[in-house]
Amino acid sequence: MSIEVTPIGVTCNLSCTYCYEHPVRDAGNHGVFDYDVNKMIEGLKKEGGEFSIFGGEPLLVDIDTLEKLWDFGYKTYGKNGIQSNGVLITDKHIELFKKYKVHVGISMDGPDELNDARWAGSLEKTRLATKKSLENIEKCVQNGVSVSLIITLHKLNATPEKLPKLKAWIKDYDDRKIIQGARLHTLQVDYDEIDDKFSLTPEENVRVMLEMAEFEKTLKYIKFDLFNDIKNILIGNENVTCTFHSCDYYSTDAVRGVNGQGERVNCNRTNKDGFEQIKAEQHGYERQLALYNTPKEYGGCKDCRFFIFCKGQCPGTGIKYDWRNKTNLCQMYYNLFEYFENDYLEKGVLPLSKSILLKKLEEEMYKIWASGRQAFIQDAQKNVLVQIKTKISS
């Protein structure tokens, strides 16, 4: 599970056209600047795990507050994290990144026109902001700061005409050992007009992701963690990012958030109503129970052999912006699971999706969810093996 601290909510220096936080901004709830670092630290202590600073744009937070948060993180966990668009990074920030072992995630979609959806008010300002982010990546790496990328794929950077430039950009970083890793995001939008303007079609998403999976094989150092997640979870290793864990709208169990006043809050990916929700005290897994029983044509996952690995994915990507439905990226994920399933089989490895115990694993995870507990594949495996041994011995 991940822990995110958001001192200023969704306040940002950019206005990325497709940002999933726009419903909050459109409602006028941009965030506040009366954050309290002591309350945030107390909130993080209660959560009890490594954390990253998020936004909006977290580098809008004053430098003293950032240092206090990172000092706590370094002393407690030995490292820190931040997710930024990279535009506002200064020499002082880089100094603190080094001092407190801060891993810097940079959200950008490529160089030049590939990043134009990350809007800064005009095309000129947008290109200047993109140039600044690229320069700051180089400065961070030159100073020994660990950097990774989050790249969102859309019509501006992943069409057949644009994808070669995106790959060349990534390949250059790989050749120079600049970037440690990258995550590929498909577009999450909350408005039909943005979907129509920027989103790739389901078929295009499949094509692009499979092409990127093949492209990864040509890289020496950079790995796309989306693909690693799929490979891991197919063999029962649940050291994966939040979207591969059971999650619902009311508690976002896969992500634990702390706001600027130290309050527990939900992940903004599920926020469609325009206001920050206080996290529900009790976790629920009704979404997984419903998806398991609901036919695919009605927005469910019934009879999908990849269900316990995918779990319907993030509720923030539910079909028609409805968290109760499976992800609108179902076709893409199914094809990726199938791709890496076949890759395992070709290497002589049997993924759990092809195991004769798959149905029993599904039934066991269903029982765990129905009891109100988070279900993990490894726990289900242990329970199934105990049942088999008991049956044999009797």
Image (cartoon, rainbow, N blue to C red):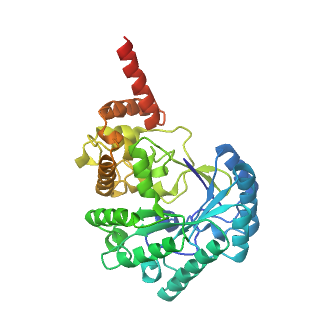
307 or 266, which lies in front?
307
Which of the 4 quarters of the picture holds residue 294? top left
166 or 64, which lies in front?
166
215 or 249, which lies in front?
215
Answer whether residue 314 is visible to the viewer in this image. Answer: no
Image coordinates of residue 40 in percent, x first then y, are 70, 54
Which quadrant of the rendered structure holds the C terminus?
top left
Image coordinates of residue 384 in percent, x first then y, are 39, 26
39 or 278, which lies in front?
39
For the view shown, which residue lies furthest in the left direction?
297
Residue at 35% over, 16% down: 392
Which of the 4 quarters of the picture holds residue 91? bottom right
For the view shown, which residue lies furthest in the top direction?
394
Image coordinates of residue 163 in percent, x first then y, are 36, 75
Q: Across the whole image, how many numbered discs are drawn on residues?
A: 0
Relative vertical location of residue 357 with respect to residue 91 in this rendering, above or below: above
Image coordinates of residue 364 in percent, x first then y, are 38, 30
Residue at 53% over, 37% down: 282
Relative vertical location of residue 254 with respect to residue 131 in this rendering, above or below: above
For the view shown, which residue lies furthest in the front direction?
348
Residue at 59% over, 80% down: 135
Answer whether residue 163 is visible to the viewer in this image. Answer: yes
Relative vertical location of residue 38 with respect to residue 13 in this rendering, above or below: above
